[in-house]
Image (cartoon, helix red, strand yellow):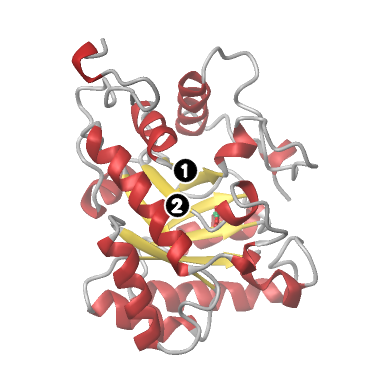
Amino acid sequence: MLNTANVTPYGTLPPASPVAARKPVSLPRLKELRERGEKITMLTAYDATFAAVADAAGVECILVGDSLGMVCQGLPSTVGVTLETMRYHTESVARGIRRVQGTAWVIGDLPFGSYQESKEQALRSATVLMQAGAHMVKLEGGGWTTETVRFLVERGIPVCAHLGLTPQTVHALGGYRVQGRGDSGLQLHQDALALQDAGASMLVLEMVPAALSAELTEALPRCHTIGIGAGSGTAGQVLVMHDMLGINLGKNPKFVRNFMSGQNSVQEAMSAYVRAVKDGIFPDNTLHAW
Ligand code: KIV
């Protein structure tokens, strides 16, 4: 029931998740979910209202992804997103969740150019997003990022790594293609182990063969794998909100499912996503994976 005293014409947010047993999401809580075999759910959100709706739908982790460059700013890729833009959206999301006393874990994406120069630059950029309300920062790539991850983790910043298709390096990769096939899977495997050793507590695997990501999930007990186009064997799943609501009018990659279809509201669609991931119905390896 909405508290009508708080109803405003434009920005009334939904109440926090009605699930009484829900505790604030934290690293120990995510570990608990993983240990009991419950899938971790993640969606992107970029503003206060959608973040609050996702929280109310029971989504555990909200990624303020630099995909906002494409879905909010109309850029051709994520390369043009700035740290200031990420700060603004992270702050909006964190404010929305705080206003409804939500429980979601907020991840701020470090944009292209904000962490590549040095570990110190990464720390300065991560500080901006943490002070905007993020609980964790995400950065893309393996190998050279390992020492940056260690440096941030040692300084108290939880880090989510990102391997496979890393959109910030799309030009170097030659397009949005499946990564980690054949011999390159070995390199990806080594990079993932090194990131866990450096202290990364989460790892997004994007467009990676399902068999490889299932194998990595086994090999990474301290680093929760979150798949997007990586099959059903990961510890959790993430989708870009606009894709799963069916409002991306471009050609959707095959790992996307439109959860809005058959639902009456965005919150219902997000709840359907949470249920499908928890029940192991989404993703379906025969439809959404390689
Ligand atoms: O920026 C983003 O939304 C992401 C997801 C696609 C994982 O990195």
Position above or below: 185 against 97:
below
Q: Is the Cβ of the residue at disc 2 closer than 8 Å to that at disc 1?
A: yes
Position above or below: 71 against 83:
above
Which of the 4 quarters of the picture holds residue 170? bottom right
Residue at mark 2 to residue at mark 1: CA–CA distance: 6 Å
Tell me the amino acid under the disc marked 2: Val
Label 2 neighbour load within 10 Å: few <14, some 14-19, many 20+? many
- Ligand 1 image position (quadrant): bottom right
Residue 30: % across, % down: 30, 48
Q: Looking at the image, which residue is at 21% across and 40% down?
A: 24
Residue 276: % across, % down: 52, 28
Q: Looking at the image, which residue is at 23% across and 12% down?
A: 4
Which mark is on residue 153?
Answer: none
Tell me the amino acid under the disc marked 1: Ala
Residue 216: % across, % down: 52, 62
The quadrant in which the N terminus is found is: top left
Label 1 neighbour load within 10 Å: few <14, some 14-19, many 20+? many
Q: Secondary structure at mark 1?
A: loop
Would residue 166 be visible to someone looking at this image? no
Left or right of 177: which side holds 145?
left
Residue at numbered disc 1: 45
User: Which residue is the extreme one toward the front?
Assistant: 9
**Along the line of sight, the residue nearer the viewer: 144 or 99:** 99
Residue 12: % across, % down: 33, 23
Which mark is on residue 64?
Answer: 2
